[in-house]
Image: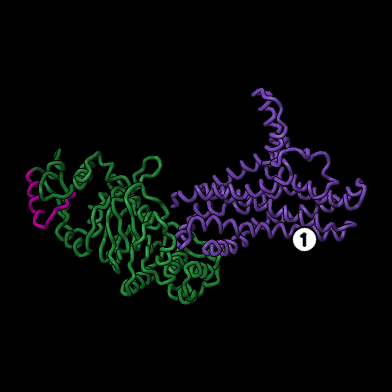
Chain colours: A green, B purple
């Protein structure tokens, strides 16, 4: 059975906000599926649809063989959910939270064993109102583990966790996946997804912009690299000219520094030659592209500040004055 | 039964809420005070029994203004609060349907408020035994049952509101509005008299007393006092409708109205919550 199958999914919120646009993908049994994208890319809306919190405007979503728009509640017995932006019940203790989940899921887990597993056994009888963010996250993760679910949906699972907590979380997830559990792992932090996931989907502006094995994405990355050129004077239209070159992926200009992303390493020389003919180059810095850049390239975010400083992913793909798919060059040229 | 799991967990949560107990304590304290003060009224009645019954009717009438506040406070955040804080993601991430949530919340908050009514009734019983010459058991039990039913009505209204809106502020605003409309507005004149003004003076129709009586009785507090009046003929006075009036203005119809006030708000709330985007 396909754990998650999404087809032609679309969600428009009142007021005309298009949160998810024609989204299709499927998750295979037993894999750790990374769901990546900047804040506002439509990840949470997608997860909310997958869990039946929000109904789609168009398209369909099937989870564990059951359409989420139908009688979906019984299916949740086999799903573990770690939501994002939740709050716990301040007046209930950690154990009471787990007892409730166990009873509701008709599971037979031992609350103490789960508390032990997520590392908060010593806080079992304390009320969640006094918990730190990290403890809340551990308890919420423990609640998701109840009943040995076939599918774990984790939305930003490492938020609030310290490095040890993140490592433990990672180990537990890998453990569960090895045992056949499918894990749907949503995050805006690339390195996290890179560390545990088999396949990754990248969302931006409500659309799926990439979906591949983590290895393939990495190979794609190795094919590209970045070069920084410090110029003594900046000739007019240099950015536009460079972006016309077939080897160039993106161009950005900050003050007198030109930043060029190339499709392959050899192209750097062409770029330097091209610029040298038109301006005096004061300095050249060549750097390998990072995973972050790959992410930025897919999501259309300008790295290092630029005009969309932080979290501007929400509308970037659609706001690029209609240039749509060509955002790799156009978005960055127009500094 | 998932609704029971929801109720059980929610009861555990709600009974630890200080604000709920504060509201209930104020209500219970008020009932106690009322019982002590009203003792003086006994001498205006022909018999001790009639006097005590009259005091108990007074307790219920006074309570009909106070109970809604306690019930609304105890339940208006039940669902809207969880939507605002995000804990609803756990509630709906488990095998609970939206109906389970509405029903479970209604059951647990009703249990909390009925506990409060039981506390108030104990205070009533103690003061009856200590301060009053007779203990009219039947009237006492009816008064207690009516207060509980009335409280449950307002829990249903509060849950209906809470299921219909997405934020605490809206739940509070709508709850306050409903309270003013049903309990403050009607203190000055029954709804029927406003309808009468509209009906005869604005629209120019002939008087229709049955209609006005019927409309007035649709308000929970009025339906409640209708039932109270049937407890004892001595205090019914001239307020009862003529015997040949239609059944829907007779006091016997009031329980139907009261039950409708439980079902309708829950149905409206559930319908809205069922199709709501919760995120």
User: Residue B221: x percent and y percent?
Assistant: 71, 44
Please name the residue shown 60% across and 48% down the image: B157
The foreground one among B226 and A210 is: B226
Please name the residue shown 59% across and 50% down the image: B263
**Callout 1 secondary element:** helix
Does B141 appear above or below A281? below
Snapshot quadrant of residue B197: top right
Residue A270 magenta-highlighted: yes
Does A328 appear above or below A186? above
Please name the residue shown 38% across and 63% down the image: A157
Please name the residue shown 12% across and 42% down the image: A241
Q: Chain of mark 1?
A: B
Residue A37 magenta-highlighted: no
Q: Residues within 10 Å of mark 1 (few under 14, many from 20)?
A: some
Q: Which residues are magenta?
A: A254-277
Q: Can residue A304 be seen in the rendering of this structure?
A: no
> Which residue corresponds to mark 1?
B122
Does B126 appear above or below B247? below
The foreground one among A107 and B216 is: B216
Left or right? Give the position of A318 relative to A147: left
User: Residue A25: x percent and y percent?
Assistant: 27, 57
Q: Can residue B263 be seen in the rendering of this structure?
A: yes
Number of disc labels:
1
Left or right? Give the position of A42 relative to A234: right
Snapshot quadrant of residue A266: bottom left
User: Residue B266: x percent and y percent?
Assistant: 57, 50
User: Residue A32: x percent and y percent?
Assistant: 30, 66
Does B195 appear above or below B231? above
Left or right? Give the position of A306 relative to A105: left
């Amino acid at each position: 059975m396909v754990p998650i199958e999404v087809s032609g999914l679309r969600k428009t919120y009142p007021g005309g906000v298009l949160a998810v646009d024609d989204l299709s993908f499927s998750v295979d049994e037993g894999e750790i599926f990374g769901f990546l994208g900047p804040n506002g890319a439509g990840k949470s809306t997608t997860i909310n649809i997958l869990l039946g919190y929000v109904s789609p405007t168009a398209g369909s979503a099937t989870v564990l063989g059951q359409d989420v728009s139908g009688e979906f509640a019984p299916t949740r017995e086999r799903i573990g959910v770690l939501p994002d932006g939740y709050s716990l019940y301040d007046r209930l203790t950690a154990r009471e939270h787990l007892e409730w989940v166990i009873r509701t899921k008709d599971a037979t887990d031992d609350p103490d064993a789960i508390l032990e597993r997520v590392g908060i056994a010593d806080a079992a009888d304390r009320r969640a109102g006094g918990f730190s963010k990290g403890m809340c996250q551990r308890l919420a993760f423990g609640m998701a583990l109840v009943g040995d679910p076939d599918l774990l949906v984790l939305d930003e699972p490492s938020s609030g966790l310290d490095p040890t907590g993140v490592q433990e979380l990672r180990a537990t997830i890998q453990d569960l996946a090895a045992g056949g559990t499918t894990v749907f792992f949503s995050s805006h932090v690339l390195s996290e997804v890179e560390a545990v996931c088999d396949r990754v989907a990248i969302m931006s502006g409500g659309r799926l912009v990439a979906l591949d094995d983590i290895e393939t994405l990495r190979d794609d990355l190795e094919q590209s690299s970045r070069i920084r050129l410090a110029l003594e004077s900046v000739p007019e239209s240099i950015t536009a000219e460079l972006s016309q070159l077939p080897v160039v992926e993106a161009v950005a200009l900050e003050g007198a520094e030109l930043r060029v992303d190339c499709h392959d390493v050899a192209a750097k020389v062409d770029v330097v030659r091209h610029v040298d003919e038109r301006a005096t180059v004061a300095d050249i810095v060549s750097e390998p592209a990072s995973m972050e850049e790959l992410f930025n390239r897919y999501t259309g975010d300008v790295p290092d500040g630029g005009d969309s400083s932080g979290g501007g992913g929400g509308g970037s793909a659609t706001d690029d004055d209609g240039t749509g798919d060509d955002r790799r060059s156009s978005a960055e040229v127009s500094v | 039964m998932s609704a029971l799991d929801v109720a059980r967990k929610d009861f555990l949560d709600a009974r630890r809420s200080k604000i709920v107990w504060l509201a209930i304590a104020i209500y219970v304290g008020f009932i106690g005070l009322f019982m002590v003060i009203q003792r003086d009224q006994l001498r205006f009645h022909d018999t001790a029994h009639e006097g005590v019954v009259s005091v108990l009717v007074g307790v219920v009438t006074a309570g009909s203004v106070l109970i809604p506040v306690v019930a609304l406070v105890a339940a208006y955040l039940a669902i809207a609060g969880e939507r605002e804080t995000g804990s609803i993601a756990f509630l709906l991430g488990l095998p609970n349907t939206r109906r389970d949530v509405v029903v479970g919340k209604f059951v647990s908050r009703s249990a909390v408020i009925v506990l409060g009514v039981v506390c108030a009734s104990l205070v009533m019983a103690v003061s009856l035994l200590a301060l009053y010459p007779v203990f009219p058991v039947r009237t006492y039990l009816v008064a207690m049952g009516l207060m509980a039913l009335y409280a449950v009505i307002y829990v249903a209204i509060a849950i209906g509101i809470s299921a219909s809106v997405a934020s605490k502020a809206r739940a509070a605003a709508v709850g306050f509005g409903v309270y003013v409309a049903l309990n403050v507005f009607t203190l000055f004149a029954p709804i029927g008299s406003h309808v009468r003004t509209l009906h005869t003076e604005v629209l120019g129709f002939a008087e229709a007393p049955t209609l006005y009586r019927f409309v007035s009785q649709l308000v929970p507090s009025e339906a409640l006092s209708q039932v109270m009046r049937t407890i004892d003929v001595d205090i019914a006075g001239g307020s009862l409708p003529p015997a040949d009036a239609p059944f829907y203005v007779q006091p016997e119809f009031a329980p139907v109205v009261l039950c409708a006030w439980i079902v309708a708000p829950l149905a409206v709330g559930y319908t809205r919550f069922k199709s709501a985007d919760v995120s």
